[in-house]
Image: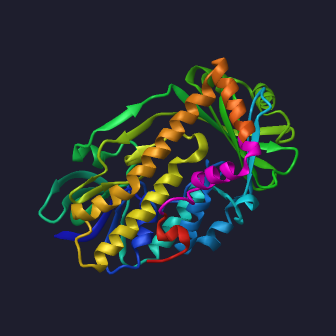
Amino acid sequence: MIEKYDVLVIGGGLVGATLALALADQPIKIGIVESSNIYQSTNQKNQPALALSKASVNILSTLGLSVALQAVATTINTVHVSSVGQLGQTRISAADIRLDSLGQVIPAQSLLTVLRDAVRKKSHIKWLSPAHLQHLERTDTGYRVAVKMGEDVTTLDTNLLVAADGSDSLVRNLLGIAVKTWNPLQTALTAILTTSQPHQGIAYERFAQSGPLAALPLPGQQYALVWVLSTAQSQKLYQQDDAAFLRGLQQAWGYRLGRILQVENRQALKLHSLCALQQVAPGAVLLGNAAHTLHPIAAQGLNLSLRDTAALAQILIEAIKAGQNPGALMVLEKYRAWREPEQTRVLRFTEALNNIFSSTFLPVKLARNAGLCGLGMMSPIRNMLAKQAIGLSGKMPKLICGLKY
């Protein structure tokens, strides 16, 4: 027996679950194929933290998650940007752009749990978990997909196949979509820091010769650290004992965070970036890291993907209400045309930022210091750039504006 769906999402992570939740109240059948067991509890201690922009927080709040997120989130009121050994710095505050916050910091697994709990309450959504994609084939109206659950293989038909299965997307590969990739030969070191003074809702971005650092506020007097380094440098630092590692951190940060008292849960993640050369095809669309995987500098990756997800949901709901096949190419082309310009801008911005702030070339160092000084003094330009960075500019999906479809 073949199960039929209007929308089938491959990948039940943050992006896939958000799309399903955004579509949940429509008169359609949605399936989510997830390789992990969503019914199995996970260890949430010392989990990685995510910086959600104001636009992302708005999207999730409009989907009814604000109360659940408040229990696990830390608000960002201010972002402080500086460079080691330079006078230039700038400070962006929510009050300056007339917002209640710039975003939130949320442990990744906590956010995933909140999303999945909300999706499980929706009657039109079926989870297939743990389930593994085996193969797919094009049909007249969409795709036929085979997934394996335990020892059984189930056949599914769908009008729209959504690839939300990450950077190494199997769906993307089976569709034959090529990607442009580049490896910056960098590694992100992450850790949880305990400091001597409260963070007061300030997130810090600091550019050192070794690479950019971010400190994201967590409950109490803790921060989530992200330190991007060359792979060779990261290996040396990762192998240091805690005392030596703390000394290096304190030197890089100065005392903006206070004294750094403790470091826990050090992890290393090799970085790579990619961009799919095609994001839509008849009956299929790529979403999240399957479409574009960004450098972590400025925390744009997930936030861009959530804005994409909100826009895709809006386009699909308009098509459904008009009686159109959600997998029709003319429907998906509307999504591509809407989102491609911002995707390109954000991708170029993150790569340029990484190149500028990792450069040791003296003229570049002087220029970036002057740029930070200038931003600190020119509030209209600073505030405009801030709104772009947190997703509150250009053509925004309805969910960002607090509007349901």
Would residue 109 be seen by someone viewing this image from the given angle? Answer: yes
* Left or right of 343 in this view: 154: left
Q: Tell which of 7 and 323 is nearer to you.
A: 323
From the image, which quarter does the N terminus lie in? Answer: bottom left
Dominant secondary structure, magenta:
helix
* Image coords of residue 377 (percent x, y): 77, 44
Looking at the image, residue 186 sits to the left or right of residue 80; the answer is: left
Count of all numbered marks drawn on residues in the image:
0
Q: Is residue 22 above or below residue 37?
A: below
**Horizontal side, residue 74 vs residue 255: left or right:** left
Residue 52 in the magenta stretch? The answer is no
**Colouring:** rainbow
Q: Residue 204: x, y in percent?
A: 73, 44
Quadrant of the rendering where the C terminus is positioned: bottom left
Q: Residue furthest left?
A: 140
Q: Is residue 383 magenta?
A: yes
- The front one of 144 and 311 is 311
The residue shown at (58%, 35%) is 353
Give the residue at x 77% y 26%.
Answer: 248
Q: What is the magenta range?
A: 375-395
Q: Residue at 59% of width from left, 51% of height from top?
A: 389
Q: Residue at x 53, y 34 (%)?
A: 352
Q: Tell me if residue 89 comes above or below residue 150 in the rendering.
A: above
Q: Which quarter of the picture shows residue 362? A: top right
Residue toward you, 186 or 103: 103
